Image (cartoon, grey):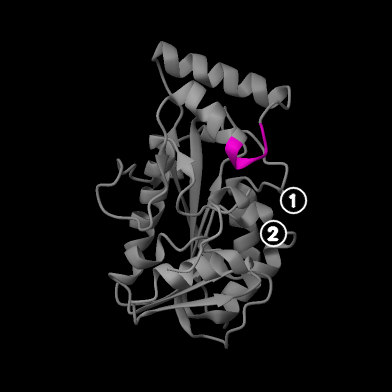
Amino acid sequence: MPKMPDPSEFPITEVPGQRVTEGQLSEFYTRYRFASTYCRGKAVLEVACGGGQGLRYLARVAQRVVGTDIDPRATRMSAYYCRDWINIAIQLADAHLLPYKRNIFDVVILFDTIYFLHNPDQFIREARRTLKDDGTLLISSVNPKWSDFNPSPYTFKYLNHSELQSLMAYEGFETDLFAAFSSPQGGKMDLLTSFFRRLASKLRLIPTSIRAKELLKRIFYGTLTPVPLEITDLMAPYCEPVPLSYFPDSRQFKIFYAVGRKLCKP
């Protein structure tokens, strides 16, 4: 096995080996299980695939899966772990300029990355260009209106669900919104953790390095688990995303999903 990069070298990219909470594992599993419902028998592109831990999960139902990332360390890691899968391809690529022809994918996916893009509307245009007619663009994002929201120092802008839906509509998508992972509602420890999260965020005490973040998580959440090499069923609880229109107040949800259908030009 070739030497893989140290997981701590990736300050924002999610790769196998990074130690996370059970809640984060649930988020990883939920995003790919939710996405898989749109991928059966389809040609799928995951942009910013990180260490590739979700590509094989999607490839079990998709016709073919292409994973791209702008970080060559991530694509090297993904290519190695997916080397035995004939329906998975890995390519180094910038989300703002996808190296693919028009109308070749059924599904384009971007998980928890849009706020790291300096020009998200350019990515959405690129996704539309590469999607077939009636193709699906699936984007997940942390909710900046969430009560425990903590912004990353590496981001450009956090779009709320209404802003993202409007942007996708402008670029030619009819979009449905879903939400998952509501804030704790009652347990004393959960409420105390939530309080300290908000306080640390307000005082800008949240660390930026992976190792420092892991230390802080161990203090508040206890034992951490490494991100696995592959997302699998039952690896963590599944949190069924619900239509956001059911809830008048979006602040209780940590994650939202935008599922856009490419509209054909008249």
Question: Residue 107 placed where, x, y %?
Answer: 44, 72
Quadrant of the drawing holding the C terminus: bottom right
User: Front-most of 52 and 258?
Assistant: 52
Task: Please name the residue shown 73% across and 22% down the image.
Answer: 203
Give the side of residue 183 with respect to residue 33, left or right: right
Task: Please name the residue shown 61% across and 69% down the image.
Answer: 72
Residue 64 lies in quadrant: bottom left
Q: Main secondary structure of the magenta part?
A: loop
Task: Please name the residue shown 49% across and 22% down the image.
Answer: 220
Question: Residue 13 placed where, x, y %?
Answer: 58, 54
Task: Specify the amino acid type for callout 1.
Answer: Phe
- Judged from this view, the residue extending furthest toward the top is 188
Q: Residue 156 carries which label?
A: 1
Give the side of residue 176 with respect to residue 164, left or right: left
Q: Which mark is residue 117?
A: 2
Q: From where the camera sits, is residue 236 visible?
A: yes
Question: Residue 14 placed where, x, y %?
Answer: 52, 52
Residue 94 lies in quadrant: bottom right
Q: Which mark is residue 31?
A: none
Judging from the image, what secondary structure is the residue with disc 1 in? loop
Task: Please name the residue shown 59% across and 41% down the image.
Answer: 210
In the rendered view, would you say 240 is above or below 85?
above
Residues in magenta, as a range: 207-211
User: Front-most of 84 and 140?
Assistant: 84
Check whether the beta carbons of the residues at disc 2 and disc 1 lie within 8 A of each other.
Answer: yes
Please check the rendered image and state whether residue 208 is part of the magenta-colored stretch, yes or no. yes
Question: Residue 122 placed where, x, y %?
Answer: 70, 69
Judging from the image, what secondary structure is the residue with disc 2 in? loop
User: Front-most of 247 and 99?
Assistant: 99
- Label 2 to label 1: alpha-carbon separation: 7 Å
